[in-house]
Image (cartoon, rainbow, N blue to C red):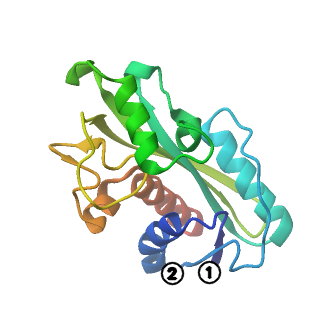
Amino acid sequence: MRVILASNNKHKLDEIKKILTPLGYDVVSQSEAGCNIDVEETGTTFEENAVLKAQAVYNFTKTAVISDDSGLEVDYLNGAPGVYSHRYAGENATDAERCAKLLSELSGVDERERTARFVCVICFINENGEKTVIRGTCEGYIGTEPRGENGFGYDPVFMYGDRSFAEISSDEKNSVSHRSDALRKFSETIKNMKG
């Protein structure tokens, strides 16, 4: 079944393809589907933003759509950066600048208080317009310096056990990440709908 990802983010597309292709889904980006719209993420929760993106692409294409909204929640910062994860250090900040801002906000904070989680909320709208919204998480903590060469975003400072997300392979990350958690729950839900 063909599914449009309501994004042109290559990292997201690769991650989602790796997980959904073996389940029989042909995932394409919205630009590959000829849907060149820019959806303003005005929601205050990951759920609201995921639904906004999926609904806009569904309204345009009238075909199955999957979207995700994801980010990092740090307990010491009362859940920040949250839905503002991408814009946390300014609209055009680099991944390195976002990580640096986060580390400066946590300067001097004890490791036990640096607990954090990556959150991914998926919204799937099937060809009939029926919505399914699912949340996935991955628990960890924020390290004290960037580590590793893999990954993107906050991966170099997000510690999973004794390694950062940027120090583990993409296959290992895909098996434990917030996105894989959400997609695993999504695939179970879809199997149950079919069966």
Question: Seen from this angle, which residue lies furthest left?
Answer: 162
Q: Position of residue 68 (x, y in %)?
A: 58, 54
Q: Nearer the viewer, residue 122 or 82?
A: 82
Q: Secondary structure at mark 2?
A: loop
Q: In the image, what residue type sits under mark 2? A: Gly
Q: Nearer the viewer, residue 131 or 62?
A: 62
Q: Secondary structure at mark 1?
A: loop
Marks 2 and 1 in Cβ contact (< 8 Å):
yes
Q: Quadrant of residue 166?
A: bottom left
What residue do we see at 68% from left, 66% from top? Answer: 65
For residue 125, above or below residue 115: below
Give the crowd class for mark 2: few <14, some 14-19, many >=20 residues within 10 Å: few
What residue do we see at 28% from left, 38% from top? Answer: 140
Q: Position of residue 5 (x, y in %)?
A: 63, 67
Q: Which residue is mark 2?
A: 24
Q: What is the tally of numbered marks visible in this picture?
A: 2
Residue 23 appears left or right of 131: left
Give the crowd class for mark 1: few <14, some 14-19, many >=20 residues within 10 Å: few
Q: Position of residue 43 (x, y in %)?
A: 71, 37
Which image quadrant: the N terminus? bottom right
Q: In the image, what residue type sits under mark 1? A: Met
Residue 173 appears left or right of 8: left
Residue 2 appears left or right of 107: right
Residue 39 appears left or right of 182: right
Q: Which residue is mark 1?
A: 1
